Image: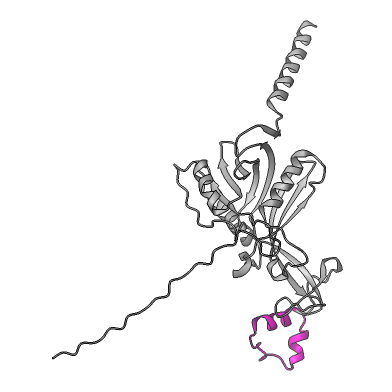
Amino acid sequence: MARIRNKKKMFVKPIVKKKQANVDHITGDKIPKSFVFARGKLPSSLRQLQMDLRKLMLPYTALKLKEKKRNSLKDFLNVAGPMGVSHFLILSKTETAPYLRVARTPQGPTLTFKIHEYSLAADVAQSQLRPRCPQDLFKNAPLIVLSGFGSGEQHLKLTTVMFQNIFPAIDINTVKLSSCQRIVLLNYNKDTQLIDFRHYSIRLQPVGVSRRLRKFVQNREVPDLRNLQDVSDFVTKVGYGSESEGDDEAATVTLANDLGRVNKASTKSAVKLQEIGPRMTLQLIKIEEGLCSGGIIFSEYGTASEQRQEKSQNNEEDEEDDSD
């Protein structure tokens, strides 16, 4: 008779996804979250810009958000409430130019920007000799820096508040240096009235340490010393970054605690920014009170009443010229 084997039952432990926090456990503030999606048909380059913006907004955004043609703005709004989504970034394209709308849910306001120029993250990386994008770069939200918005005008104040609230606030007394790895810079030019949008990675390098030593400590690999007569040649060899980079006093900081294997507490480190993209040149066109609707708070082309007044004034001037 054939022997009957007893099959052992296998128990597979289910994978439990860690639920994302809605409130910062240190500051107690609500963490802003976002949806990045498109309205209407977009060309492939703008679709890629949409993915770049989603990656920029990590970790508090839906990187793989599925959208369909039949989805309306109300559909996104219905999902946003239970998921704690506080902001929408909406891309669209007309015959003249692409646009980016930044809206706060559920009741607005909404800022509409015209995209004059843009470069994708892949284009920025391709232009660099040594592009840098480590795996853990997007584990924490970026810092936000606004420059040139302090003129006191209402539309610039609203723009400042909107972008400040898109990203989580930080407490300088409790923030961990290891979580500050990216920065988003918005610079307003009052002459051209354009906003330069940039996205950088932050890295620190110890001052006074050669590039070879940094690589040796970080990579934990045995260096190739076959062509050297002495170990000192490895440290002092000219032409391979023997002098530390970025020793400018204005770009150095003294660390409060250790950061990695190279940057130690109470030592000076050089702050280096490397652009990772995307980059955009934006122009604020309109601010609406509600969510993509409502009264016009600001318009680059003036309000409807101002346009009518200007038009009537021009007509009166034309009539006077004709009578003369």
Q: Is residue 134 visible?
A: no
* Outermost residue toward the left in this view: 1
Splitting the image into 4 quarters, where does residue 272 fall?
bottom right
Colour scheme in use: one colour
Q: Which residues are magenta?
A: 211-240
Residue 3 part of the magenta-drawn span? no
Question: Between 194 and 162, which is closer to the camera in this rendering?
Answer: 162
Q: Is residue 177 above or below residue 262?
A: above
Q: Is residue 152 above or below residue 315?
A: below
Quadrant holding the C terminus? top right
Numbered-mark total: 0
Question: Between 39 and 287, which is closer to the camera in this rendering?
Answer: 287
Q: Residue at x 50, y 67 (%)?
A: 17
Q: Position of residue 267 (x, y in %)?
A: 82, 77
Residue 237 part of the magenta-drawn span? yes
Question: Between 312 and 235, which is closer to the camera in this rendering?
Answer: 312
Q: Is residue 303 visible?
A: yes
Question: Between 88 and 309, which is closer to the camera in this rendering?
Answer: 88
Drawn side of residue 6 relative to residue 69, left or right = left
* Outermost residue toward the bottom in this view: 229
* Outermost residue toward the top in this view: 323
Q: Is residue 133 above or below residue 214?
A: above
Q: Position of residue 58 (x, y in %)?
A: 60, 59
Q: Residue at x 69, y 50 (%)?
A: 163
Q: Is residue 210 above or below residue 185?
A: below
Q: Residue at x 56, y 37 (%)?
A: 94
Splitting the image into 4 quarters, where does residue 24 fall?
bottom right
* Outermost residue toward the right in this view: 249
Q: Position of residue 31 (x, y in %)?
A: 64, 57
Q: Position of residue 154 (x, y in %)?
A: 77, 39
Quadrant holding the N terminus? bottom left
